[in-house]
Image (cartoon, rainbow, N blue to C red):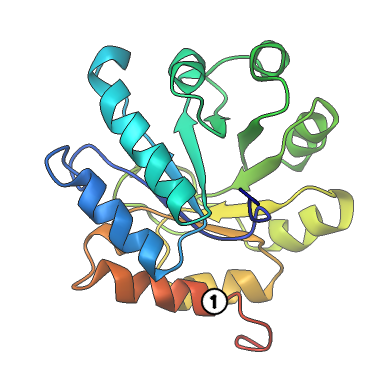
């Protein structure tokens, strides 16, 4: 399949908001609406518990020509042949991840740290994520990052810049105008009256001319 560029709406699953009896159905709605990247994020259940849903979500993503990413769990990503992983400061070392995953996508959380982002790019990161830009319902302890970091990052990085943290469509619109390539969303997508329609609203932010 011809995979898309790393750009657009990035939806991240949540153990409470995307319960495992509904996760496949919910993710498919987001993909129908235009999500381009899906991340399976689960900090508590075992790899064995997650593997079936991982396979199902990967198949769905490929059906809709989107990427499937696993948060943190490199071994799980390998088992299900995910398109990549996303790692944070407390997760695996990018050099070791690169050895295991070779040419797969590696996303890295950089919070509000441009220098970390530059280092991660030099070590082979496929994209970097900054945030939280607003108070986040799923990560209330996250520090708020100034929006100016987006333009700073675009000046010094050649890889895509992802934004995350307390986003809704209006907030995301401003960040896309500032240069964000990828908008990562948790609560606002999964709690929407219509997941598919909300995903379309985010998708429309990336249609040429729609936000300028």
**Image quadrant where one finds the C terminus:** bottom right
Circle 1 — which element? helix
Q: Quadrant of residue 31 in the image?
A: bottom left
Relative to residue 39, is residue 44 drawn left or right?
Answer: left
Depth check: give the residue in front, 152 or 108. 108
Residue at the image position 38 percent from the left and 55 percent from the top: 135
Q: Is residue 195 above or below residue 149?
A: below
Relative to residue 76, is residue 50 drawn left or right?
Answer: left
Whole-percent x, y for residue 20 in the image: 17, 37
Q: Is residue 52 above or below residue 200?
A: above
Whole-percent x, y for residue 155 in the image: 87, 57
Q: Is residue 211 above or below residue 57?
A: below
Whole-percent x, y for residue 104 in the image: 66, 30
Residue at the image position 68 percent from the left and 83 percent from the top: 208
All told, the count of numbered labels is: 1
Depth check: give the residue in front, 211 or 115. 211
Q: Quadrant of residue 205 in the image?
A: bottom right
Residue at the image position 48 percent from the left and 44 percent from the top: 143
Depth check: give the residue in front, 74 or 158. 74
Depth check: give the residue in front, 103 or 85. 103
Would you say residue 44 is visible in this rendering?
Answer: no
Residue at the image position 29 percent from the left and 62 percent from the top: 29
Would you say residue 95 is visible in this rendering?
Answer: yes
Relative to residue 169, is residue 85 drawn left or right?
Answer: right
The residue identified by callout 1 is: 173
Q: Residues within 10 Å of mark 1 (few under 14, many from 20)?
A: many
Whole-percent x, y for residue 110 in the image: 64, 38
Question: Which residue occupies the extreme left position in the image?
Answer: 21
């Amino acid at each position: 399949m011809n995979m898309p560029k790393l750009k657009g709406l990035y939806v991240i699953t949540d153990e409470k908001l995307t319960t495992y009896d509904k996760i496949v159905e919910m993710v498919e709605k987001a993909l129908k609406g235009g999500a381009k990247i899906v991340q399976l994020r689960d900090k508590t259940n075992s790899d064995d518990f997650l593997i079936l849903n991982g396979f199902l979500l990967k198949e769905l993503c490929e059906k809709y020509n989107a990427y499937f990413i696993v948060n943190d769990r490199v071994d799980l990503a390998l088992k299900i042949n995910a398109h990549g992983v996303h790692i944070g400061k407390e997760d695996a070392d990018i050099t070791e991840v690169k050895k295991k995953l070779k040419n797969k996508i590696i996303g890295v959380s950089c919070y509000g740290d441009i220098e970390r982002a530059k280092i991660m790019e030099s070590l082979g990161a496929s994209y970097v994520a900054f945030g939280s830009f607003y108070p986040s319902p799923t990560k209330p302890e996250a520090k708020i990052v100034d929006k100016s970091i987006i333009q700073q990052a675009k000046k010094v990085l050649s890889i895509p810049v992802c934004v995350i943290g307390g986003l809704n469509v209006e907030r995301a619109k401003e960040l896309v105008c500032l240069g964000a390539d990828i908008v990562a969303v948790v609560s606002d997508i999964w709690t929407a009256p219509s997941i598919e329609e909300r995903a379309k609203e985010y998708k429309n932010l990336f249609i040429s001319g729609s936000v300028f």
